[in-house]
Image: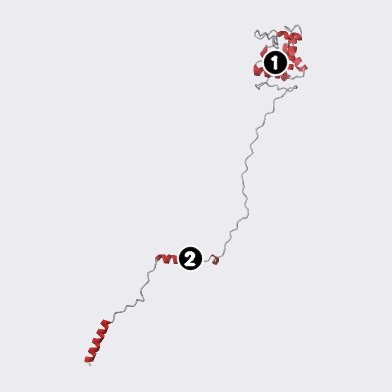
Amino acid sequence: MLAAFSVLATAGFVAASLVPLVSFPNTAEATELDPMSLYASAVEDAQRYQAGDAPSIELDRASEYTVYVKPTPTPTPTPTPPPGKKSSSGSSSRSSSGWSPPFVTPNPGSAQAIAYDMVTSRGWGDSEFACLVALWKKESGWRVNAYNASSGAYGIAQATPGRKMASVGSDWETNPTTQITWGLGYIQGRYGTPCGAWGKSQRSGWY
């Protein structure tokens, strides 16, 4: 009996040494996971959210818009000064320099008083007489014997030469009425009015 047991034990030992060991997988072995795969799975799960699962919200927007534009202020127009007053003959009472002589009542019996009567009788106003006073004051100082040796001009109106006034009267050398009559006729025929002659004198120094 003991011998038989020894034979079996020896046979089992030999068999065990001859048969190769077989490895079996460990069912409890953990699988190594990629961190990026975990992140991708989380994102994918998040993207599975359906917008339709939540109540829709619509924004109330106006279909038309009103744009306010600040108006540009209208500039205040600069008033245009009225044109200068003109005499009855249509010529301006102001000279080219813009200055108009003031009217001064002449002394009775003087050459200027004689001239004033003649001016008004021709239909000219006080402004024209003021121009005449300034003109002949510049030319002769209203002296009947004023004489310009260089030009030969003579008298209140400075006729050139003085003998031209003989067409009005032979006393042209001493009579202010004769000289003024000739002078006003010359002014009216050449410049229209005393202010027209005054303007020419202001521009060129003579009339």
Instruction: Say whether residue 103 is visible.
Output: no
Callout 1 secondary element: helix
* Number of the front mark, 2 or 1: 2
Label 2, label 1: how far apart the Cα atoms are: 110 Å
Callout 2 secondary element: helix
Q: Residue furthest bottom?
A: 1
Type of amino acid under label 2: Ala
| Residue 152: quarter of image | top right
Closer to the camera, 32 or 101? Answer: 32
Q: Is residue 68 above or below residue 201?
A: below
| Residue 196: quarter of image | top right
Q: Residue furthest right?
A: 121
**Left or right of 191: which side holds 27?**
left
Query: How far across and how far down the image is residue 199, in percent?
Result: 68, 19
| Residue at (26% x, 84% y) in the render | 15
- Say which mark, if any, is on residue 46: 2
| Residue at (47% x, 66% y) in the render | 44
Q: Residue furthest left?
A: 3
The 10 Å Cα crowd at callout 2, few under 14, some 14 to 19, many 20 or more, is: few
Q: Is residue 30 above or below residue 176?
A: below
Q: Is residue 55 above or below residue 206?
A: below
Numbered disc total: 2
> Dot 1 corresponds to which residue?
133
- Say which mark, if any, is on residue 182: none
**Left or right of 124: which side holds 78?**
left
Query: How far across and how far down the image is residue 117, in percent?
Result: 76, 15
Query: How far across and how far down the image is residue 187, in percent?
Result: 72, 16
| Residue at (25% x, 87% y) in the render | 11
